[in-house]
Every structure is written in C-alpha cells, then in structure tokens.
Image (cartoon, rainbow, N blue to C red):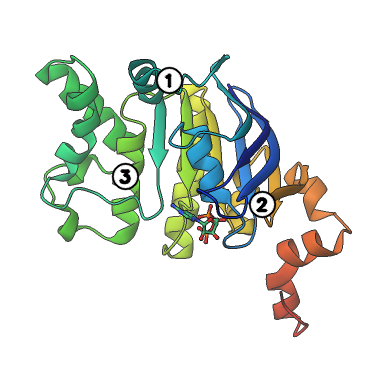
Amino acid sequence: MIKLDDVHFAYGQAKPIVQGVSLSVTRGQVVAVMGPSGCGKTTLLRLVAGLLRPSEGQATLLGAPLPYDNAQALREVRKKMGMLFQFGALFTDMSVFENVAFPLRENTKMGFEEIRAQVMSKLTAVDLADAEGKMPSEISGGMARRVALARAIAQNPQIMLFDEPFTGLDPIAMDTIAQLIRQQTNELNAASIVVSHDVQETFAIADYVYVMHQSKMIAEGTPAELWASEEPFIKRFIHGRHALDAGKVVV
Ligand SMILES: Nc1ncnc2c1ncn2[C@@H]1O[C@H](COP(=O)(O)OP(=O)(O)OP(=O)(O)O)[C@@H](O)[C@H]1O
C-alpha cells in the first residue's frame, strides 16, 4: 500500500533531511516512524503524501509511483488518503458536524442525506455524535483531536497518515486516540503511518516500527524486538523515561 525505496530529500540547497530511507506498509498495518525531534519524520510523511518529491528514490502508493507531474492524478491519490497533521487544527468558524462534512462536500458528489449519514457514522466512531452542533471553542483538546480524526477518516481512506497525534493530550485522551487509530485501521483495512516520539502509546498499537535518527533509518522491527534491543541509542530512546524513573542519566 505504501512503499518508499531508497528515498532522498533536501529542502533546496540545504543539507539532506531524508537520506536513503526505505519503508513499506501493507493493508491493515499500523506502522510507526519514531525518532528524536528534527530527525526528519514530518518530512518523511510529506514525501509519502506526495506533498514533497524525492530528489532520488521512489515513493509508491497503492501499487503505483506517485504521479508528481500530473496534478489531477495526484489529487485523486490524495483523496484516498486521510491525514491528521500535528495539532489537527479544526476550522474554528464551523461546527463539529461541518468540520467533518468539509472533505465530503469538497471532494465528493455526495448528497445532503448521504453526507449526514457518513458524518454521523464517523462522529459515532469517535464517540462524539452528541457534539455535532458544538463549535471547536466549546470542546476540549482531546475532543477536538477526535473530531480531526473523524474528519481525516470521513472519506474511508485506504491510507492514513498521522503526524504526532498524541501531542498535547492527557494520558487518557492519548490512549483514546491511539485505540481509535488502531480500530479505524482495522475497520477500513487501511495502511497507517503514525509519526510520534511517544513510545508507550505508539508501541501499544503499532505492528512494526522504524526508528529515524539524523535523516536515516537506523533500526526497524516489531515493538517487542525494539523493546529488547541492546543497541545503545535505541535503548536510550526507548527506555529513556524509565531510566529517569530509576534516577539514571536520561537522553
Ligand atoms: N519547509 C522547510 N524548509 C526548510 N527546512 C525545513 C522545512 N521543514 C523542515 N525543515 C527542516 O528539516 C529538519 C527535519 O524536520 P522535520 O519536521 O521533518 O523533523 P521531525 O522529526 O518531524 O521533527 P519534530 O519531531 O520536531 O516535528 C529540521 O531541521 C527542519 O528545520
């Protein structure tokens, strides 16, 4: 469903931000891309979404290379993607219902009743059917993130991309979002990438994890494999918090 083959990227003449990265995500999988701040995770997600074009290597989505030179074809591929970007901003002047309806009105020919049914089904999936008439200023941060998730999945995407979906949420809201990502990936039989540095939430739902450091993939494996890794950087990245608990040196 998603494949990157030896992808390289730099913003203009600056130093490379993504160097020789390969990854693949199959249907029904939640794959995590983790790594310290600034290592290039968001850039990688933009490459998968076709918002950036690799300078070398290839990005393949749904079995075909991304059609960078054909704007219409690229738009069609994007319609099959749901994206939840960092902080998942909602349109503040639209109700919860209208926020979720927005992509359906923009990208489909669905009629009023069909849109209503689809929006309510997605709001029910994130347990917010009661909030349909509320404005974003009237709901909590955790609820807003769930609305953003409902909006991202409004069109039943086959590919879902989540950039730091847990940032700024309390532990319970984080856990709710994580479980929703897992559940919706299963339900839509989609391929999902979650970019995060939250080890606990991400490991709980990911089938496979890639670790990025200084623009390169330095490790990959199942959460259990990485948890058991003896490689010093991986160990520090994954167990840093526990080292703090034990009063030891932290990354
Ligand atoms: N539009 C841009 N133009 C130039 N440089 C950029 C641009 N976007 C990001 N960068 C640089 O690319 C590097 C990687 O950024 P990126 O956002 O991909 O990292 P990240 O791993 O997602 O970080 P974080 O976890 O903090 O969000 C950073 O040094 C950043 O300054």
**Residue 215 disc label:** 2
Crowdedness near tag 1: few (<14), some (14–19) or many (≥20) residues, C-alpha within 10 Å? few
The outermost residue toward the right is 230
Depth order, front residue of 49/200: 49
For the point 89% across and 59% down, which residue is it? 230
Mark 1 in CB contact with mark 3 (< 8 angstroms): no
Is the residue at mark 3 in contact range of ligand 1, meaning its CB lies under 8 Å from it? Answer: no
141 left or right, relative to 98: right
Crowdedness near tag 2: few (<14), some (14–19) or many (≥20) residues, C-alpha within 10 Å? many
Q: Is residue 181 visible?
A: no
Say which of marks 1 and 3 sits in front: 1
Q: Mark 3 — residue?
A: 148
Q: Is residue 19 visible?
A: yes
> How far separated are the C-alphas under marks 1 and 2?
26 Å
**Secondary element type, mark 3:** helix
Depth order, front residue of 36/147: 36
Q: Earlier in the sequence, mark 1 or mark 3?
A: 1
Residue type at mark 3 is Ala
195 left or right, relative to 71: right
Q: Mark 1 — residue?
A: 69
For the point 30% across and 37% down, which residue is it? 151
Depth order, front residue of 234/200: 234
Is the residue at mark 2 in contact range of ligand 1, meaning its CB lies under 8 Å from it? Answer: yes
Residue type at mark 1 is Asp
Instruction: Reply above or below: 70 against 4.
Output: above
